[in-house]
Structures are given as C-alpha cells and as structure tokens.
Amino acid sequence: MKGMLKAERFKFFHSHSLWVIIGVLVASCGISIVTGTYNSAEVTLANLIKDCMVPILACAIYSAIILTDDFSNGLLRHYISNGYRRASIICAKFIHYIFGCSILLFVYPYICVLLTALVQGVETSFGAVISTMLFTFLKSLPLYLGIFGLFFLFSILIQKGIISMGVSIASAILLVVFTNKFYEGAASVLKYSPIIQIGEITNNITGEYLVSVAISLFVLAACLFGSIVKFNHDEL
C-alpha cells in the first residue's frame, strides 16, 4: 500500500489536470467578477456555496481523467505483475481522487473570493470572509464525498475515459436537477439528501445535516467496496 501511495503522490504532483480544471472554473467566475455581477467577496462566496453543480461536474470530469488512463496504458498490469494487491491499487487511487476533489472544493472558491476582494472589495472584512469559507468547506465536504464516490465507481466500472466522463456528467446533472425539482413535493424525504443539505450549508448544524452526512459516508464506503470487488474480478 505504501508503494502505491508513493506512486499516486508522484502522479498527483506531476499531473496538471486538476489545476487546469480549477483554472477554467476561476476564469468563468472571473467574468462575473469583472462585470460586477459579483460585486463583493461576500456575494461571490454566497453564490459559490449555493451553486453545487459546478464543483460536482468538475469532479465528474476529474475522475474520468485521472482514473481511466491507467486501464488503457498498461500501468495497472505493471502494478499487478510487480506484486501490488488489487485492493491496495484501488485504495491508493481512491485517496488520490478524494484528495484532489477536496483541493478543488477549497481552492476554487478561495481564489474567486480573493480575486473579488482585490477587484470589488469586501463588505465586512477579508478575515471574516475567510473564516466563513473555511467553515462552509469543512461542513460541506462530507456531503460531497458520497457523490464523488459515485464518480469513482463509474470510472472503475466503465474504464473508458470519454464514456465514463459522459455517464458521470449526465448522472450529476440528473441528480442535482431532479433532487431540487422534486424537493418541494417530497421535502420530508429529500431533506436528508446531501444535495439539499449543501444548499443549507450556511445554517446551523441540524439533525437533517447529520443524517445526510451519514448517508453520504455510507455511499462513499459502498462505492469504494464496489470498486474493489469489480477490480478484483477484472481481466487486465
């Protein structure tokens, strides 16, 4: 396991895909900053917190980029032939992916908020904005983990980059759109959905939030288990 973690750490520091994705997101946000749509750091942060679709889609794309190449380039066969256990390979890739997604969730809004503060200014203080951002990041991360786990599982199941990316993006759109669409009619059930709780992230910690976190972590664990089982039965 230690050897696989070293290999994935090397790949993380020598891959530019995560930073390219973050750069594209920041550039898109920059348009709203320059045009004055986001006219303060607080407004920028509030909008980024509510718009969960953007980081979800970004991580759907990221999963296909970093997870599927090794199936086609023969690297996984090389790992296995050198004695690495298949479960260790999947767990190392899982840690790599979740770590990258966590960085995206924090760095993307941080850069956008910093740019807005420099261009448009702040309404309160920059320190207060940073504190709020840290709180929302720590509170929202567990809610996103189950969704990221689904993208990880899709990539392991499909193994082909373009198809995996398409399935993940389509699933993300359906998940977010339909959850929000049916929330009004089925609030008693959907209030426990991580998607709904992400939208409520600025409120106090509630029972619904804790249940939602438990659901998200269960989905994450189930997706990791399913990925290990699938990879153990693959012929590479």
Image (spheres, grey):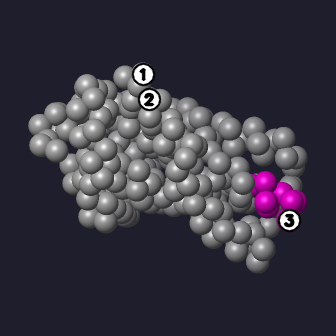
**Is 132 inside the magenta-drawn segment?**
no
Mark 2, residue position: 5
Quarter of the image where the C terminus is located = top left
Q: Looking at the image, can residue 101 be seen?
A: yes
Asked if marks 1 and 2 touch (Cβ < 8 Å), the reply is yes
- What residue appears at the point 35 percent right and 42 percent down from the top-left corner? 149
Mark 3, residue position: 119
Amino acid bearing label 3: Val
Cα separation, mark 1 vs mark 2, equals: 5 Å
Between circles 3 and 1, the one closer to the viewer is 1
Q: Residue furthest bottom?
A: 35
Location of residue 131 with respect to 179 vertically, above or below: above
Instruction: Give the magenta-colored segment's residue range.
Output: 113-121
The secondary element bearing badge 2 is classed as: helix
**How dense is the environment of label 2, judged by Cα within 10 Å: few (below 14), some, or many (20 and up)?**
some
- What residue appears at the point 28 percent right and 38 percent down from the top-left corner? 78
Amino acid bearing label 1: Lys
Mark 1, residue position: 2
